[in-house]
Amino acid sequence: DIVRPQVDILIGMFHAGTNAEYDKAETTARGLPNGNASKLVAEQVPGFDVILAGHSHKRIPNKKITIKTTKKNPLIINAGSKAYNLGVAQLILKKEMGSFSLIEKNGWLEPMKEVKASPAIISLTQYYHEKTLDYIHTVIGKLKQPLLGKDSRLKDTPYIELINKAQLDYSGADISFAASFNDRLNIPPGIIQVKDAYSMYRFENYLYVIEMTGKQIKDFLEFSSKYYIYKNGKLKTNPDFAGYNFDVAEGVSYDIILINKPGNRIQNLIFLKNHKLLQADKIYKVVMNSYRATGGGGHLASAGIKNPRFLSKSNVEMRTILIDYIKKIGVIDMEIDNNWKLVY
């Protein structure tokens, strides 16, 4: 209401997808905002001429569209991902009495496949590009056995154990939560470089340490177990539960009883510092990434935590923490403890 009278064109740019139903049930149940609300804004917030969406990587529109009416129905564009397409909004205005009125909007996606890189941009970035290549090929340690992502969401693996142990080493927490961000990871034995750490950990997360009770930790893991669907003796993954939201823990051991429904799947939850059952009312220090600690995925909300008690936050990215940990241990020769397993 404040901006609209001052401008001829009003464009909203949101890191949010257009399918508001995608995870609506989960977010609503846990008091979280809708992460894909761009179309809701287009429909319910008057005044926008164009809305540029994101987050979902869905390409919109599929073909060129023309909108003649100007007061309603904002033009919505989502270029997708990885610069495969350029989103184009063509706005046709008419000058009247010293001001402009919008009479037509056209929108389409322009494929970038055949577009050559600008020599000027290449010239400006070449030095930094080469420096980046030098950096990512820096040797940080040695690897005794392959690090594979293939089964990292089905059983304890050296890949996720390495991440969890790096988090525990940095934070001094009792328990660590981490997810497999790359189930296609394949790092062969030999030298390990900075680029390999980036392959293991794809996101720019930081680390948080928060307080959680034993019950909240169990509820967190129960929520994570929704990743699995077990029916008629067959194991499948839940299409509505992203793999990067399947967290596993280190510092505790537990079984995931697949025949049970989520909410009653986590059994034999043992605190490994004393090898006793995790106490429901005792407070533990738990380390997790910043996305999870600030509500991402809905795990904390499912455990009844809306305002976590933060004990610490890292001042460097988790990828830097992982790199430093690999440098510290020198040789990666992980002996997995099989602290969690699926029970059919």
Image: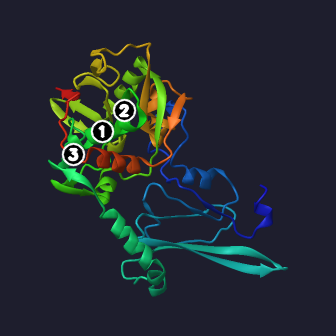
Mark 2 lies on residue: 176
One can see residue 182 in this view:
yes
3D distance between C-alphas at marks 1 and 2? 24 Å
Q: Earlier in the sequence, mark 3 or mark 1?
A: 1
Q: Nearer the viewer, mark 3 or mark 2?
A: 3
Q: Position of residue 140 (x, y in %)?
A: 29, 55
3D distance between C-alphas at marks 3 and 2? 19 Å
Residue type marked 3: Ile
Tell me the quarter of the image containing the C terminus: top left
Q: Nearer the viewer, mark 3 or mark 1?
A: 3
Mark 1 lies on residue: 238
- SS label for mark 2: strand
Q: Label 3 crowding class (10 Å Cα cut-off): few <14, some 14-19, many 20+?
A: many
Mark 3 lies on residue: 332
Q: Earlier in the sequence, mark 1 or mark 2?
A: 2
Residue type marked 1: Asn
